[in-house]
Image (cartoon, grey):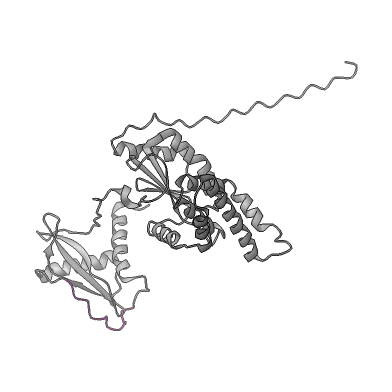
Amino acid sequence: MFKPRRLTALLFATTLLAALGCRAQTPATAPPAAKPAAVDQGTPLSPEQARRVEVLVRQRAALPPGSTVSVGGRTSSDVADFDTVSVTISNDGKTSRPIKFLLSRDGKTLAQFTKYDISADPRSLVSAADRPFRGGPETAPVLFINFDDLECPYCARFHASIFPAIVERYGDKVRVVYKDFPLSELHPWALRAAIDVNCLADQSPTGYWNLIDSIHAHAADITATAQAGTDKDPDTTKALARANAELDKFTLEQGKVQGVDLSKLNACLVAQDKKAIEASLQLGTSLGVESTPTYFINGAKLDGAVPIDFIFNAIDQALVAAGQKPPPPYVVPASPTPAPASTPAATPKPGQ
């Protein structure tokens, strides 16, 4: 069991070693270390103070004997009663980047912490600009953004059950927006589906959502169509072509229903421009999206098949933070009580 002091030491050492990178310890007979990188000059520490900092760093990071620790001077910091001191570590011919510490003005305390900027609204982490939406308007207090893969079976189940429940419970207080994150390595026709639905979105947001509904509902059928005849012809290229043709058919049929410019829509389907999808993939990756579905509720990330009450709770918290009153607490429906097993009729005795 870790003691708090032991955990602090471990974190301290991890920070320092990360600056050098993982490598084996160097024996005492190692070649001379590289010349240390320049550190902030500032007001030089006394030899005694610099030695105290060096000894602490060596002990906490368990540095090998052949390493060199260089301690810079004091420079101003934005923490009251503390100055900044930079330390570099050289070992095995390699030198770390400067590592920042805080040294108290009285010289008795050395500290290290990480500062994060939280001035931006987390809701702005993922932009919903120019995307079709369901639910509330742009001014809705909660923005629910889902990174979706149209061939993903988990996404299909999520789409069929969770989103209708969100719209039903919250109405115009939640704005639902989809971002594309096709996992092409796992799902061969997911990229084509993402491009097709966005082709329709350019002319009809309503058609976009109807097509999303349709593809998620019939994903298994599209895959079955693609795989039809593969026993006789295992060519995966032809199988993918069959899936692509089915997706284009779904898209054109929905385009007809919405009365869009079919020649423009067809030209978009033929072009298969994937730049917008690649940008969405890049955005998702930068936000730590690794699987689908992954969704952000006013910037708070959730992923996987979490229970619906977890999602409702996250939305309720976002509403409270926005100064809105959430609906009454959601009560998870009780599981139906199984019917008691029937008692078998008694076997009549002979003569009865």
Say if the magenta span includes residue 28. Answer: yes
Q: In the image, what residue occupies the spot 32% across and 63% down?
A: 14
- Tell me if 350 is positioned left or right of 32 in this view: right
| Majority secondary structure of magenta residues | loop
Q: In the image, what residue occupies the spot 63% across and 59% down?
A: 242
Say if the magenta span includes residue 229. Answer: no
- Residue at the bottom extreme, as displayed: 31
Q: Is residue 303 visible?
A: yes
Q: Is residue 158 visible?
A: no
- Please name whichever residue, 4 or 273, is drawn nearer the observer in this view of the structure: 273
Where residue 93 appears, x then y in whole percent? 30, 80
Where residue 215 appears, x then y in whole percent? 56, 49
Image: 30 above or below 294: below
Where residue 157 appears, x then y in whole percent? 54, 44
- Tell me if 126 is positioned left or right of 82 in this view: right
- Tell me if 62 is positioned left or right of 220 in this view: left
Where residue 166 appears, x then y in whole percent? 44, 38
- Please name whichever residue, 13 or 112, is drawn nearer the observer in this view of the structure: 112
Q: Quadrant of the C terminus?
A: top right
Q: Quadrant of residue 284?
A: bottom left
Image: 275 above or below 317: below
Q: Which residues are magenta?
A: 27-39
Q: In the image, what residue occupies the spot 46% across and 51% down?
A: 201
